[in-house]
Structures are given as C-alpha cells and as structure tokens.
Amino acid sequence: STQGYSSAASDVYKRQVWYSCGAIALKNKFKIYFMKIVVLDAYTLNPGERRWEELEELGEVVVHDRTAQLDVVRRAKDAEVVLTNKTILDGFILNLLPKLKYIGVLATGYNVVDLDVARQRGIVVTNIPAYSTQSVAQMAIAHLLNITQRVAHYAHEVHNGVWSAQPDFCYWNTPLIELAGKKIGIVGFGNTGQATAQIAEALGMEVWVYTSKPKKSLPKKYQKVTLNELFSACDVVSLHCPLTAENKEMVNSFRLSLMKQGAILINTSRGGLIDEKALEQALLSGKLLGAGLDVLSSEPVPNGNPLLKLKNCFITPHIAWATRESRMRLMNQAVENLKAWMEGRTINNVLEI
C-alpha cells in the first residue's frame, strides 16, 4: 500500500516493489515481466555481438535495430521505458506515449529528446557520459598520424607494386612530418580533449588549449589562449567540444584564414562545428595540408558532398566512439542508469544538470 505517501514517494515505492518482485522471480527462475522496455535503434551499439541479457533482467525487452520516425509511436505506445540513440523523441511523440516514464539516451548528447516536454510530463531522461573518451582521443590521433605519415597511402602503394619498382631501398612521394615540437590546439577541454592532449604531449607536441576552465586547472605546460590565438599559432587544431547554437560553423573562412600555411584540422566531435564549403576552399588552395574528419554536417554523408573528392581530406564514417570496449561500457552504463531509477534514485539524469 502507498497510502500516506506523497505522489513522488509513492512512485519510488512502486518502482522498488517492481524491482524486488522481478529480482525474486528471476532468482526462482520464473519469468514475471513487470515493465516494458523498448530499444528503438540498437544496431550501431550492438549489431548482434551480445544479448541484451542484463536489460532482460529488468523487464520485457523489445529490441529494434532501427526505427523510422513514423513507427516510433506504434512501437513505443505501451512502453514505460524507451532507449534511443538517434531516433528523435520530440514533444509531439512524447505526448502520444502516455505510459512512458523513463527515456535512456544511448549516447552522451541528448538533443534527440524534447527536454521541456519530458520535464512537464515527469519523464526521467538519462544519458551516458564519458564512455568513449579514450576511443575518440585515439581516433583523433589516428587521423593526425595518417595525415603526417600517410600510412594508408603507402600501404596502398606497396600493395600496388609501386615500391617494388623503385631503384632505391625506400620510397615516398608526399611530405612526411615529425610531430615532436609542433603545436596542437585543443578546442574544448572536457574528458576527450584532455585525453587527446595527453597523447599529443607524449608525442612531444606543445599543447595549446581553448577552454572555459580556469588556467590554474590546466597542466602547467599547457597554454590557455583565445580561439583566434589558437587557430593562428597552432600547427594542428583538434575539435573536442559539443555543438551549440553559439559555436555552429565556428571553423569558418575567417578562422581558416588565420591558420598557418600547411596546418592540419582534426574533427572527431560534431560536423556542424565546421563550415564545410570554407574547409573545401582551404584544402583546395593548399592553405591546409589536410583535414581528418570522423563527423560531417549531414550523416551518412551525401554522395554530392565535395569533400569526398579531395585527396587531402580523410573522412571516416563516425566510428571514433565505436570500439567494442567503448560500446560495452555504453551498454553497461545504460543498464546501471535504468537500475538506479527503478531503485528510486537517478544517475546521469540530464534534467538535473
């Protein structure tokens, strides 16, 4: 009985009872489902590599690899819990899901959910912060090394017999660049920016940082500078900040014009941070030696995107986050977030940020 409880306390009590009943049922090998959980777009996170068995311990789970927007309401109408990655849950959709109590975003960014309507409806929204820090930093440096050492290019040349036809013991036809002593500018100094800076420092690079964090919180060797100073002085600029209305296309023709001749741009953050037409011109003119991009303004990339034709623009298909280790951390944290809510507490609740 919940008589005498406030509405909020009553909800907490009920969730604790549901969770306890489910745990007792599972312990005794009875299958009593106390809650419906719908995963709207599971494929990129878990393309059949493992079962959702930890999630299945918490309720009746229905997993969809992908969900078109027109199918969201039909698939989620009876769900109390919905997990989504990129499938949009706007206000219109949320108001058509009367049973919905919890949304778990299977990513760090949560702009796919209308938070105002979720708050009005009393729907808890959680996300997964910092699960891919090391993987994304690794990709940023991988792009940088590919541009400076051209590993993919030379492996291709060797397979095509170009080295075999040379009169000398070695062969190269592009500039090869040592990173030690070069300046790298890190735009955004959250978890991923810090991890990237640490790897760059290990390679002997001088680290410059654009961040809202106070200077005293940075390692003493790092230079805190303005954004324009960073673009002007650094040999490499690597983006590690979220996309906001204020910084959309902050890498524009003006900032690209500030960069050194032959500088390098890396983006493993959000495609919308870059004005892609301006970047195309900087690459075509030779102002930039190269760009390494794991993200673009439109994904998947349309065939007509002019960056695809540029030999000094290296694009990977938004996979910096997608190492197996990173994805398993994400899945595990998604379950922990849901468990916490069922026990009457919340972790990674974006409405409390």
Image (cartoon, grey):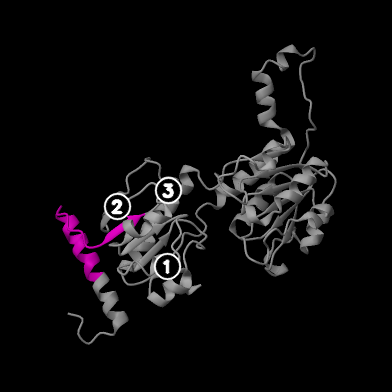
Mark yes or no: residue 333 visible: no
**Rendered residue at 72%/68% (across/down):** 215
Describe the element under mark 2 as helix, strand or loop.
strand
- Please tell me which residue lies in front, 283 or 19: 283
> On residue 328, which mark appears?
3
- Using a 10 Å C-alpha cutoff, classify the residue at mark 2 as few (fewer than 14 neighbours), some (14 to 19) or many (20 or more): some
| Type of amino acid under label 1 | Phe
**Rendered residue at 31%/67% (across/down):** 342
- Identify the image quadrant of the N terminus: bottom left
| Type of amino acid under label 3 | Met
Disc 3 to disc 2, C-alpha distance? 19 Å
**Rendered residue at 40%/65% (across/down):** 93
Residue tagged 2: 62
Q: Give whichever of discs 2 and 1 has the lower sequence position.
A: 2
Residue range in magenta is 16-39
- Magenta span has 204? no
Judged by depth in the image, the label closer to the viewer, 3 or 2, is: 2
- Magenta span has 28? yes
- Please tell me which residue lies in front, 97 or 37: 97
Q: Position of residue 228 (x, y in %)?
A: 80, 61
Residue tagged 1: 92
Asked if residue 18 is positioned above or below residue 27 in the image, the reply reads below
